[in-house]
Image (cartoon, rainbow, N blue to C red):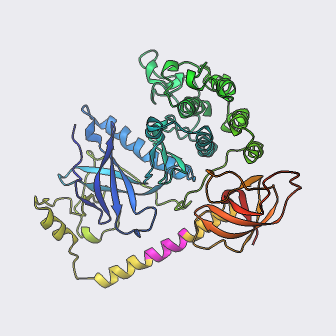
Amino acid sequence: MKELSLHSCRLDRRYDVRGQLGRGSYAEIFLARDILASPQSTHSTVVIKALNVFLQDDLDADLERTLVENFQNEAVALDRVRHPNIISRLGHGTARDLLGTVFHYLVLEYMAGGDIQAVIRKRELAPQQALDYIEQVCAGLDHAHRHSIIHRDIKPHNLLLNWDLSTVKIADFGVARLHLSDAPITRVGTNIYAPPEHSPLMAGKGGDLDNTALTPAADIYSLAKTIYSMMTGEAPRAFANEPITSLPENVMSEPWADELIRVLRRATASEPYERHQSIIEFWGDLTSVRQAVAEGEYSTLMRSSIPAPQPHVARGYSPVVPDRPSFDPITASGLKKVTDPVYQPSYVPQTEAVRSGDAMPVDSTVTADPAAFADNVLRPPRRGRGIRRFAVFAILVVSFTGLLYGTASFVRGRVMLPGTTTSPRGQVAIASTDIYLRPSPGTDQDPIGLVTKNSRVRIVNSQNNWYQVDILRQGRDRGNSTPNANRGWLNGKYLQITN
C-alpha cells in the first residue's frame, strides 16, 4: 500500500492541499483551497478525490483498468445527474505527487457540515428536520433514477450537509450503475444498508446475480434503512439483510411510529418487486408519516399534497457542468515530457503529459527543500507572458459568461435560487402553498400569521433564503385562524416571483 504524498502541495498551480480527510480502497480524499476562487465564494474550499491504484496490494493491468473506468464513471454519473441535492463535480486533472506517483483526481464541492452519520452520533434529529432532509434526498434520488443512474450505496455516511445544516446532498457515486439494464449485479454497499440483491453479506453465496435486473427499488431499500437511522438515531443492525419490522422502544410511543414501520417494512422487502418501484411512490407513501409528525402544522399538512419531493437549493449551486474527463490507465501509458509545464492547460490528456503536484515536468526531480520547490515552480518564464495572460483572461470571461447564462436558464425553468446577487426587495410573489409567517427567519418561533396558497405578497426584506413579506391579498379566506399578522418571515422556496 502506497499513499500519495501531497502534504503542503499546490496542485496544478491552483489547489493548495491542506490535509487528508480520508482514504478508501482505491481513492484518497484531501481538503484543498482554490486560490483562483474568491474568498467569499462557496467553492473557495474544495475536496480533491485522488484515484490511487497503488492502494491495491495485488494490482494488475485488469484491476487498474477497472479502477480507472469506475473513477471516470463516477465523474460521468455526477455530471449526468447535476442537481441541487447531489454533490457537484467542479473539475478534474492528472498529476504527480511529490514522490513522482502519477494519479488522476476529481475536484468536488466541500460540504462543511459533515455527514448525517456524524450528526446523529452527536444528537437526535428532530422528526421534522429528519423529514426535511429525507425530502431533499428523495428529490436527488428521483432525479438520478430519471437519468438511469442507480447509486447503490445510500447510507447516512454518504449524505453530506452544508455549513448551516440546511441542505443535504448525496455523495459518492463511485459504485453507481450508469444504466438500469447493466449486468451482472456485483456485491457492493454497506451490509446493514445494502439490499439483498447486492449485499456484501451475500458475497460468496452465489457470486454475481446474472438474472436479476437492478432497479430503483435497490436504492429505495437502502434509503429506507437510512431513514430508520435518521428517525430513531440508531443503525438498523438488527435488520441487516432483513425487512424492518419494528422500531426502538424510545420511539415506539411516537404518533408516527406505526405508519413509519408500515412504510419501511414494504420498502425493505426481500424481493425487489414487493417494494415501492419509484421514489415518487415511496414519497407518497410517507404522507401519513409526515402528517403525524406535523402534529397540526398546517403548512406541512398542505405540502403533503405535493406529489413530488422538492429540492433545496443552497447558495453557490450551478447547473453548468465542467469539461468531461478522459482518464487512461496510469502504469500502462507511455508518457511524454511537458515542455512548458507552468503554462500548460489545467488538464493535459495522459497520453501527452502528466502534471506534477505543483506543475513540475514529468522527468523533473522534486527537491527536498519545500521553499526552493515552490520558488522553482511558481516563478513564470518571461517570454510570451503577455499573450498567455490575455488568453487566460479571455477564457475566464467566456467561461463566466456561460456560467451566468446557464444559471439564469436553470432559474427560469426550474427554481428560484436563494441568495442571488439581485435583491428581491420590492418584488411581488405568489405563494405556492399554505405557509406560516414567523416573527424572524427560521422555524424556531411560533407562527404569527398564515399565508394561504395563491396569496400575493410583497417582499420587504431578505436573509439567506428567508423573506420578510407583506400580504397584499390572501389566496382564500383564512377563517377564524389566529394569530393573523399580515407581515412576517417565510421560506423563499415557497414563493414564485412574478416581476
Q: Nearer the viewer, residue 91 or 229?
A: 229
Q: Nearer the viewer, residue 426 or 104?
A: 426
Decide: is 253 above or below 340.
above
Q: Quadrant of residue 246?
A: top right
Q: Position of residue 467 (x, y in %)?
A: 66, 64
Q: Main secondary structure of the magenta part?
A: helix
Query: Residue reaching furthest bottom?
Result: 386
Compared across the picture, whether 195 is left or right of 349 comes to right
Decide: is 246 above or below 306.
above
Query: Residue reaching furthest top?
Result: 205
Compared across the picture, whether 478 is left or right of 25 comes to right
Residue at image location 49% in from the left, 50% down from the top: 87
Q: Position of residue 56 (x, y in %)?
A: 27, 35
Q: Nearer the viewer, residue 330 or 358?
A: 358
Segment tinted magenta in the rendering: 395-403
Q: Quadrant of the C terminus?
A: bottom right
Give yes or no for residue 57 being in the magenta stretch: no
Q: Position of residue 247 (x, y in %)?
A: 58, 22
Residue at image location 32% in from the left, 65% down from the top: 14
Residue 441 appearing in the image: yes
Compared across the picture, whether 147 is left or right of 23 comes to right
Query: Residue reaching furthest left?
Result: 368
Q: Quadrant of residue 213?
A: top right
Decide: is 482 above or below 248.
below
Residue at image location 62% in from the left, 62% down from the top: 417
